[in-house]
Structures are given as C-alpha cells and as structure tokens.
C-alpha cells in the first residue's frame, strides 16, 4: 500500500514514522521536512493547492492520502480528492467547519446540546465591546478569533482593559486577518484541560487515547498561548468512567449531529476538554490530529494505523477502543527565539543524533530545514522530543535527557512538561 501524507510538521513526522514501521506500506510526503525526509521521499507540492495535491496522488498512484494540517482541510482538499475518485482520509470542508469556524462550532454545540461554555458571537468590534460592557459573561473572559490562527487566536482577558485591547487587535488591527472578522466571546471555564481523540467514518468511530497539552509559552502556564509547548499521554484525568461520559455526552452527539446536518465527519476528531466541577465541557474541536499530541499518542498505538485509516475512508469502522501500549509518553517542544510572536530562523541545530540515541527517546521535526548541509530552524516550534517510560516520571526523565543534548541559538523550552501527570487527581469531576 502506498500512502501520501500531506504536511510538514511534527504531527506529520509522527504519522510518517508510524506508517513506515508497518509491513507492506510505503510512504510519500509533501512538503515534508528533514526529519521526514530521512524516512520517506518528499515532494514539494504546497498544501494549499488541492488540485496539485490530487494530481500528485494520481501521478504517484497512491492508495490513500492522509491530510495532516487543518488549512488544506479548510480549503476543501478532501472534497477535491473525492471528486477525482481518490481515497482520502480527512473531513470535507463542510465537516471541517468544526475547526475553521469557532462560531459554527459553538452554534452547532448549542443546537445539539453538547456541553460547552456560555458564549456570544460578535460580527463587529462595536458588538463585541457592547457585550464586554454588559459583563454578562463575567471576567476573566475568553476571546477567540472565529477562523484559523495557528492555535494562537485565543486571548484570556483578566480585565475589561485587556479584553478591549484584544478586540482591537483581533477585529480592528486584524492581527490574524479575516480570521478575526467574527469574534467568539466565552465565559471562562475553571478546571483542568485534557484532549480526547477518535477516528470516525461518519457514523462509527474507534476510540484512540487522551492527552494533555501545554499551551502557554512559559513554565507554570504563564505567558501567551502557543500552538503547544508539549504534551503527555494518556491523561490521568480521563478515567474509564470519565471517558465514557465524554463519549456519551460529546462524541456520539457530535458525530450524529454532523450526520443529521448533512456533514458526516470522517477523519480524526480532536475534542479539547475542560474538566469542570460540573463535568467535561468542550473548549474546542480540531478536525485533525493535534500537534504535539500526535507525537505522544501515535507511539502508543499497538495496531496498524493504516488499517484504521483505510477502514475509516470506506465506512467500515466498528465502534471499539484501539489497542495501545500501557507505557506513558511525554513530549517536550523546542521552540525558536521570538516564538510565539516570531520565528528566529536559520539557526544551526546540533545534537539531533545524540538525542535520538537516548534509549526510549524519539525526535520529531517540525520547523526545520536544510541549509549548507546543516539542519536549521525554520519555524516557531522546531522539534518535539518524546520520552517513553513505564511511569510518567520515567518518561519525563527520558524526554528531558534527550532534549538536553540538542542545541540551537535562542532555543526555548518549558521545564515542567508532564508535571501535571504527577499530581494525583484528588476528586474527579462528576
């Protein structure tokens, strides 16, 4: 079987890594990165050109294309592939609205009684400022750009002044362009965050695993939001009882609601959760595997990924739990200087081979490139270094021991990834 993976980040490196370990599977990637290129040939077709991607799949006679990032899904790549008779894993543009339009996602959840934060949708700065002035959602308050913003279009405002400035930045100064044309204002939920993943074929689904991401740039969850500075899996917050609640109260209603609205969802569904005192509530949906969650979940998988993906594209999934290792995985993101506001590109990276040589460690490339025979930084999040262990403590130790062997100028990393897993959950939400 020949599989094309579309994308060039850490998530796609993890997908390629998992698929190339399977028998009778060959992998092609576009655009890839130096880490992916060490495992599979890479083409140079942009992920934003649906027709060019379909032509690549036809030319290379691939059996299945797996769309990694959210942007091509929002542009209708899956629709183009289907129209041309090509097998593709990933939701249609209409189904992908769960991610590319936060306003759609919130209205959808309200229609289908999926638990989430109270909210207001605003189509102008004046409307948003009026909601803030009313105080109806309280403070802190969460402001979200409606469209895609690389995981950075969210502001948690502690005060009215900060919220007003966020409205200006998103809707007037248009920090994220047209993504800020509509703004979602949400009540601030109190609790611990976790993520839950399934593979869906429109009607049925296979349960994957849970994880916990670390969004803020600095230790102790301080500083601005990022695309993710690290993750660990599985999450101890998702006990078997709590997982069943997430499935019954969120996953099943969402997938059935998408069918009812003529948008059947086929692909990876990422459910971002807040574990509140009133139970799990949805913070956000992603319509693809998370990054860096993919880097810690895919190494846990104890069955062929390609079979799951093929069954999902052909509507042959039977609802069950996927088979996983019982080991724990912790992934630490190494970011470039200036991130998340900018990327300090072109810095030579050393120690990659030494890090990969650490037993039970994996190094996934994200924002890297080759220059003069060197691997250099080429993006905000540069690498994800993953450690494996029978306990979270062991996995943390392995990840940081391997990360400590890597160097590049102005490198940033959090030193507390995985620490939340060590804190016993004294009382699970009910």
Image (cartoon, rainbow, N blue to C red):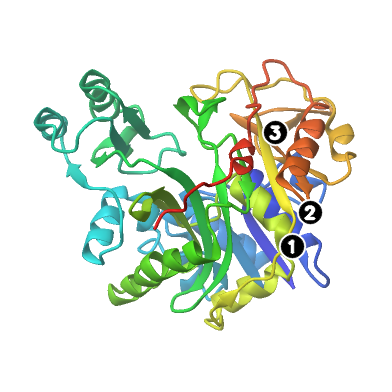
Mark 3 / mark 1, whichever is N-terminal: 1
- In the picture as drawn, the residue positioned furthest to the front comes out as 426
Residue receiving disc 1:
325
* Left or right: 5, with 143 as reference point: right
Mark 1 / mark 2, whichever is N-terminal: 2
The image shows residue 298, relative to residue 307, as above or below, that is above
31, 128: nearer the viewer: 128
SS type, badge 3: strand
Residue receiving disc 2:
40
Residue 359 image point, x, y percent: 89, 44
Q: Residue at x 82, y 73 (%)?
A: 24
Q: Which mark is residue 368?
A: 3
Q: Is residue 330 visible?
A: yes
Report if the CB atoms under discs 1 and 2 are less than 8 Å apart: no
User: How far is disc 1 from disc 2 in space, using C-alphas?
Assistant: 25 Å
Q: Quadrant of the N terminus?
A: bottom right
58, 191: nearer the viewer: 191
């Amino acid at each position: 079987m020949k599989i094309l993976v579309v994308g060039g980040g850490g998530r796609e490196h993890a997908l390629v890594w998992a698929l190339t370990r399977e028998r009778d599977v060959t992998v092609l990637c576009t655009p890839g990165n130096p880490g992916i290129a060490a495992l599979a040939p890479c083409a140079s077709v942009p992920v934003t050109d649906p027709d060019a991607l379909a032509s690549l799949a036809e030319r290379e006679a691939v059996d299945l294309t797996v769309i990694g990032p959210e942007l091509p899904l929002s542009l209708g790549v899956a629709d183009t592939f289907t129209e041309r008779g090509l097998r593709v894993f990933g939701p249609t543009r209409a189904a992908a609205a769960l991610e590319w339009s936060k306003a759609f996602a919130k209205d959808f959840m309200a229609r289908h009684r999926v638990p989430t934060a109270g909210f207001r949708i605003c189509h102008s700065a004046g409307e948003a400022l009026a909601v803030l002035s009313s105080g109806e959602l309280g403070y802190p308050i969460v402001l979200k750009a409606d469209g895609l913003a690389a995981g950075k279009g969210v502001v948690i405002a502690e005060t009215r002044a900060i919220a007003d400035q966020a409205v200006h930045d998103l809707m007037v100064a248009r920090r994220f362009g047209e993504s800020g044309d509509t703004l979602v204002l949400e009540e601030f939920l109190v609790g611990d965050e976790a993520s839950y993943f399934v593979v869906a074929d429109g009607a049925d689904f296979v349960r994957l695993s849970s994880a916990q991401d670390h969004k803020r740039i600095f230790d102790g969850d301080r500083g601005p939001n990022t695309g993710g500075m690290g993750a660990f899996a599985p999450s101890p917050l998702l006990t078997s009882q709590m997982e069943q609640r997430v499935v019954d109260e969120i996953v099943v209603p969402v997938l059935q609601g998408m069918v009812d609205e003529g948008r059947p969802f086929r692909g990876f569904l990422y459910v971002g959760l807040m574990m509140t005192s009133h139970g799990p509530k949805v913070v956000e949906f992603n319509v693809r595997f998370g990054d860096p969650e993919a880097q810690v979940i895919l190494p846990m998988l104890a069955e062929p990924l390609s079979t799951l993906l093929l069954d999902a594209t052909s509507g042959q999934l039977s609802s069950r739990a996927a088979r996983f290792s019982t080991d724990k995985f912790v992934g630490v993101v190494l970011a470039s200087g200036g991130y998340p506001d900018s990327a300090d590109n072109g810095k030579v990276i050393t120690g990659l081979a030494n890090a990969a040589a650490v037993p039970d460690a994996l190094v996934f490339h994200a924002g890297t490139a080759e220059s003069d025979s060197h691997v250099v930084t080429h993006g905000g999040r540069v690498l994800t270094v993953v450690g494996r262990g029978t306990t979270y403590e062991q996995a943390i130790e392995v990840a940081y021991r391997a990360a400590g062997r890597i160097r590049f100028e102005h490198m940033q990393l959090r030193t507390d990834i995985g620490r939340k897993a060590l804190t016993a959950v004294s009382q699970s939400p009910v």
